[in-house]
Image (tube, rainbow, N blue to C red):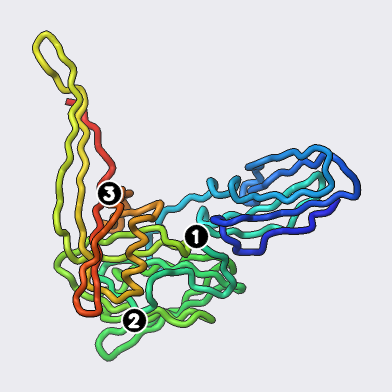
């Protein structure tokens, strides 16, 4: 028996992850999909009286993903849960271990997995996150500009592969600009501003990353309340009160590349509101959004609803 085909490293979990197995004669073939990080069998399949098998492991592995933003200081942080390290076991045979990513398409190292432009604007105190794919341990040179002075700090990842770099601008309170020079991948620059208001939103993107954007305008905020009652001898009495908050946000007028990225919020499987470093899961309410034009720029409207809170009277 021989494993004749395995998916490539950094293949997309959204597509097919095909393994092929052949045997000289007809036989029963038992397949096991293994999560290498836990050495756990996540899926099995038996084929009866066959010589050749083509098997898609993607449906078994997609549900293993756990997406949540990382918090903390500036530097490299663990990408645990953002990728799947898997293999196929057939009897005593094991396929080569592969790393699979939740992006819309496969990646090739080195790559910056992001949908946002490399020139970004954030408020002082806000955070951002970069998802990197490298063949060797990644090196990032961070230069913070304060007036005419520049200070550079070197960060090195502990291992190659998919890794996350978190920028916490609160670590550089006086900086007006921050430049990240990523070895082999170019640079990402940040202009720091001081907005009086603004709501920071994070979401899971089609690149398999978590992107951030600050909506400068809160157009409307409403509170939705649902009460459950029972009828007693004394009349109606509430037994549970469920309330949630719905917020309508307007983006700034942006160029096409940024606006295309923001449109992914409407279809993203996970969206968070970011307040004081805390990430709160939100539900996207609107399934369509009118795009307002201003010359060659456009802006986007997004409605987010918080998770309902149930209280007892």
Q: Residue 127: percent from the left, percent from the top?
A: 33, 66
Of pointers 3 and 2, the one earlier in the residue sequence: 2
Closer to the N terminus: mark 3 or mark 1? 1
- Decide which of 264, 271 is in the foreground and name it: 264
- Assign a secondary structure to mark 1: loop
Does the residue at mark 1 contact the one at mark 2 (Cβ under 8 Å)? no
Q: Return the residue at label 2.
A: 144
Give coordinates of residue 56: x percent, y percent.
66, 50
Q: Position of residue 244 (x, y in %)?
A: 21, 41
**Closer mark to the observer between disc 3 and disc 1:** 3
Q: Would you say the residues marked 3 and 1 are in contact, meaning their CB atoms lie under 8 Å apart?
A: no
Residue position marked by numbered label 1 in the rendering: 78
Q: In which quarter of the view is residue 179 placed?
A: bottom left
**Which residue corresponds to the image point at 45% horizontal and 53% vertical from the top-left?**
67
Relative to 66, 137 lies left or right: right
Tell me which label, 1 or 2, sits earlier in the chain: 1
Q: Going by the picture, which residue comes out furthest to the top? A: 233
The numbered mark at residue 285 is 3
Question: Which numbered mark, 3 or 2, is in the foreground of this view?
Answer: 3
Residue sitting at x 53%, y 73%: 111
Q: Residue at x 14, y 54 (%)?
A: 220
């Amino acid at each position: 028996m021989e494993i004749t085909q395995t998916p490539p490293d950094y293949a997309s979990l959204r597509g097919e992850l095909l393994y092929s197995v052949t045997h000289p004669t007809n036989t029963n073939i038992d397949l096991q999909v293994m999560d290498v990080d836990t050495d756990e069998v996540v899926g099995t399949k038996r084929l009866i009286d066959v010589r050749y098998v083509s098997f898609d492991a993607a449906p078994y592995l997609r549900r293993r993903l756990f997406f949540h933003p990382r918090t903390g200081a500036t530097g490299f942080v663990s990408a645990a849960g953002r990728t799947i390290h898997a293999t196929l076991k057939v009897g005593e045979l094991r396929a080569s271990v592969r790393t699979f990513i939740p992006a819309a398409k496969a990646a090739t190292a080195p790559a910056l997995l992001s949908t946002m432009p490399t020139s970004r604007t954030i408020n002082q105190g806000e955070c951002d996150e970069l998802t990197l794919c490298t063949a060797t341990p990644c090196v990032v040179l961070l230069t913070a500009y304060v007036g005419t002075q520049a200070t550079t700090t070197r960060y090195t990842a502990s291992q190659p592969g998919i890794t996350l770099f978190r920028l916490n601008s609160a670590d550089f309170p006086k900086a007006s600009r921050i430049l990240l020079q990523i070895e082999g991948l170019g640079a990402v620059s940040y202009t720091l501003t001081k907005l009086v208001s603004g709501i920071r939103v994070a979401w899971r993107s089609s690149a398999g990353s978590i992107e951030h954007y600050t909506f400068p305008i809160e157009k409307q905020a409403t509170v939705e309340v649902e009460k459950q009652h029972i009828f007693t001898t004394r009349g109606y009495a509430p037994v549970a009160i469920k309330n949630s908050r719905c917020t309508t946000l307007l983006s700034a007028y942006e160029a096409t590349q940024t606006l295309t990225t923001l449109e992914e919020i409407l279809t993203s499987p996970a969206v968070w509101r970011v307040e004081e470093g805390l990430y709160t899961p939100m539900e996207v309410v609107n399934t369509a959004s009118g795009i307002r034009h201003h010359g060659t720029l456009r802006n986007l409207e997004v409605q987010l609803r918080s998770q309902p809170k149930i209280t007892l009277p």
